[in-house]
Image (cartoon, helix red, strand yellow):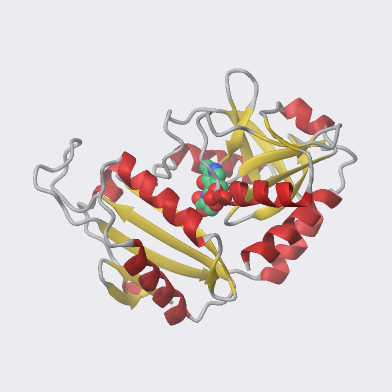
Amino acid sequence: RIAYVNGQFVRHGEAVVHIEDRGYQLADAVYEVWALFGGKLADAEGHFARLERSLSELRIPMPMSRQALTIVLREAVRRNRVSEGLLYLQVGRGVAPRGHAFPDQPTAPSVVITVSAVDRTAAEAKAAKGVKVITTPEDRWGRCDIKTVGLLPNALAKQAAKEQGAAEAWFVDELGLVTEGASSNAWIIDGDGVVRTRDTNANILRGVTRHTLLDVLHDEGLKFEERPFTPDEAVAAKEAFITGAGSLVLPVIAVNNRPVGDGKVGPVAMKLRRLYIERAK
Ligand code: PDD
């Protein structure tokens, strides 16, 4: 495997960052994950747009133009000879002696890229079986719209899910409504057949997969609504699923071990998975 670190392609096992990188000390860095289909970046523009927005919210400059970055990302994919996989890009404020406030002298942004392969056959088998989710109280900061590497609450929630045999944890806010998953957006298909996901005015990440899937729903003439739901509504729903660059569209068959609908993988969710993948390819 080959990684990209601050201007150079190096062997993955030899790739290192500075001990005073602010991403490392303060999580002062943002990231993006692209799914790769046939070596091509899925939803390329959506992820670039969100990267630029995350960076501008933190007043970190783009390390290079979107055009130049595209070339570097493609080169990273090429050097890894990965066709089906994931590309991870992290951009941080850079290296400076430790201090909470921004360094007085502007630093060069830190840039790291890794590429990993995904077994699509295994992924399809997982989707065909569906996954379980658990719920956990929303305990993240108020700016989850920024895709920062400050992911400790997400990591703890995902670990709790894993320990309970679930693939994802859904955060639930003080009103009892699901915000999103630890690394995905949350959806249901309610009793009226309306496909529902929370609006992005709330404190959630504006999922790129979510956005593309809303286009798919529109084009397919399916009823959809951006409206939050409770875990009870998910259990009472016909289907549930999650979306993200890693999960794509993944059917959910249980919430806190309570079956969703009839407890079987939903046909609409599986159809949406297929339609999403066709569009992303
Ligand atoms: N996670 N919500 C959260 C908290 C996420 O971390 C992600 C993505 C999503 C889905 O966003 P998108 O559709 O743009 O991938 C929603 C990535 C895949 C990760 O952390 O690995």
Residue 121 point in image, percent of width and height: 72, 71
Relative to 268, does residue 232 appear above or below in the rendering?
above
Relative to 86, does residue 204 appear above or below in the rendering?
above
For residue 135, which quarter of the picture?
top right
The answer to whether residue 265 is visible is no
For residue 13, which quarter of the picture?
bottom left
Residue sitting at x 80%, y 32%: 235
Residue sitting at x 79%, y 55%: 270
67 lies left or right of 151: left
264 lies left or right of 240: right
Q: Residue furthest top?
A: 175
230 lies left or right of 157: right
Quadrant of image for the N terminus: bottom left
Quadrant of image for the C terminus: bottom right
Residue sitting at x 62%, y 18%: 175
Relative to 14, does residue 201 appear above or below in the rendering?
above
Q: Nearer the viewer, residue 36 or 276?
A: 276
Q: Residue furthest right?
A: 262
256 lies left or right of 30: right
Q: Nearer the viewer, residue 75 or 125?
A: 75
Q: Nearer the viewer, residue 57 or 11?
A: 57
Residue sitting at x 79%, y 36%: 194
Residue 191 point in image, percent of width and height: 86, 32
Q: Residue furthest left?
A: 105
Number of numbered discs visible in the structure rendering: 0
Residue 193 point in image, percent of width and height: 84, 37
The answer to whether residue 235 is visible is yes
For residue 257, which quarter of the picture?
top right
